[in-house]
Amino acid sequence: MLIMAMRKKKVVVVKRRPKTGVAAAPIDKGFNYCKDYFHIDLDRKDGVKLMKEYVKTNCSKLDAKAILACPDYVFTVRTHIAACMHWINSGLEFDKRKFIQNQYQADGSVKKVEVESFYDGHDAIRRFLNFAIDAGKKILAEKSESAEEKSNVIVLTPLQRYQEKLNNTIMADLDDLEDSWIGGEEVDFDLYNRFRYHGLTGKAAEPVRRVLEGWLLDYSDAYHKRCDQAVEGYSHIKRSVMRRRIKHVELMLADCDKLKAASAATRKVRKPRVKSADKQVTNMKYKKEDNDYKLVSINPISIVGSYRLYVFNAKTREITEYVSGKVDGFSVKGTTLQGFDQDNSRKIRLRKPEDFIKVAQSKTPRQINTAWSKLTTKESKPNGRINSDCILLRILDK
């Protein structure tokens, strides 16, 4: 007889997950050990996070705002301050240390004396906070001055910028032309090419036209002697010169018309934004499933962009064939199908829906058309409306 010895059940010892970060700082061996850990082992980001949380908790809002305005390096280089803050957060007191110090006597002998020292972490934190407050206030003041300077900058509107461009380009050219004519120089001016040189469009032709029309009126009144003031003002100009200037202004006015026409011809046509398929069918009402006819609707998203759609109204027993009349297929607006050809689309009432639905779901358009022609009920034209009684049977891309 075999005697089976009972094996002792092995006890599995689950090792505790080692602590990391601030939580792993040794606080049971004295402050120096804690300080060394913060300086050597702790990630700098963890130390900065601890210091900032301490500031938010223990400082006023104004002081905290100034301190937190300081860059991170102000915090990262002061690991001993982070250790002090953690020590205080842990509810511990800073320990006193004893060490032997040599003390020289009057007779020249050396006496070893035990000295007690105390590290004041509270004072270290206080001095750091005062420094950070002063530094942060300077940073905030500089940012405030910079923001004020930016607010004083005059920002021109698009219309003002365009007007400034006109004044500095074509209007300045017209002023130079007028000065030349006043000085007796007969200078030609190609308005069309100057527009192209300055990169101006037909939009600028209107203000230029107003200036030129004023010139033409003055010269015409003087030449035809319709205004005494104009005749007196231009009396020093020969009639042949005046006639040439009138013709030149008329040519520039013709250039204005050409520029305006060219701008209209090259203007970009704004294309309407096309909604995505899922957004188009968001409000579409249809019947997802019909238990009597055992039919399930297709996903309405597939309708957008297709070219043929079969819809069955379970309430009226009408089947509708929609045929798209657009290159990009159907679209949907609300509960209405868009983009179908009214002449080629059709609907009809079914006497035996089950028989024809099988054909509509599986056959080709030509086979469906053959079966459709054998139906004896009256055919009519659909209006594109799809309601909660309609089953979306099938879509085709042809």
Image (cartoon, rainbow, N blue to C red):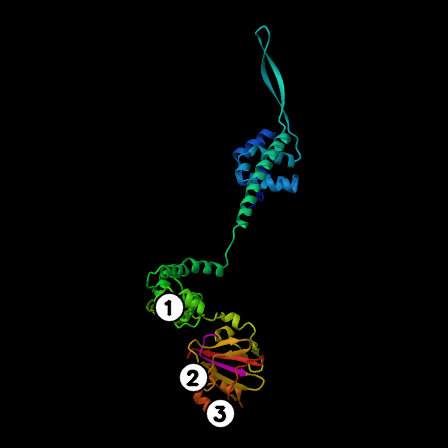
Q: Is residue 224 above or below residue 136?
A: below
The part of the image, by quadrant, that contains residue 115 is: top right
Residue type indicated by callout 2: Pro
Q: Residues within 10 Å of mark 3 (few under 14, many from 20)?
A: some
Of residue 261 and residue 388, the one placed in the foreground of this image is 261
- Left or right, 324 with respect to 99, comes to left
Whether tag 2 and tag 1 are in contact, CB under 8 A, the answer is no
Q: CA–CA distance between discs 2 and 1? A: 69 Å
Residue type indicated by callout 3: Leu
Q: In which quadrant of the rendered image does the C terminus lie? A: bottom left
Position of residue 120 measured from the top left corner of the image (x, y, whole percent): 63, 28
Q: CA–CA distance between discs 3 and 2? A: 16 Å
- Left or right, 16 with respect to 259, comes to right
Membership of 310 in magenta stretch: yes
Of residue 209 and residue 84, the one placed in the foreground of this image is 209
The image's mark for residue 375 is: 3
Position of residue 95 measured from the top left corner of the image (x, y, whole percent): 64, 27
Where does label 1 land, which residue?
Answer: 249
Residue type indicated by callout 1: Val
Where does label 2 land, which residue?
Answer: 365
Nearest to N terminus: mark 2 or mark 1:
1
Whether tag 3 and tag 1 are in contact, CB under 8 A, the answer is no
Give the farthest residue toward the top: 107
Of residue 258 and residue 280, the one placed in the foreground of this image is 258
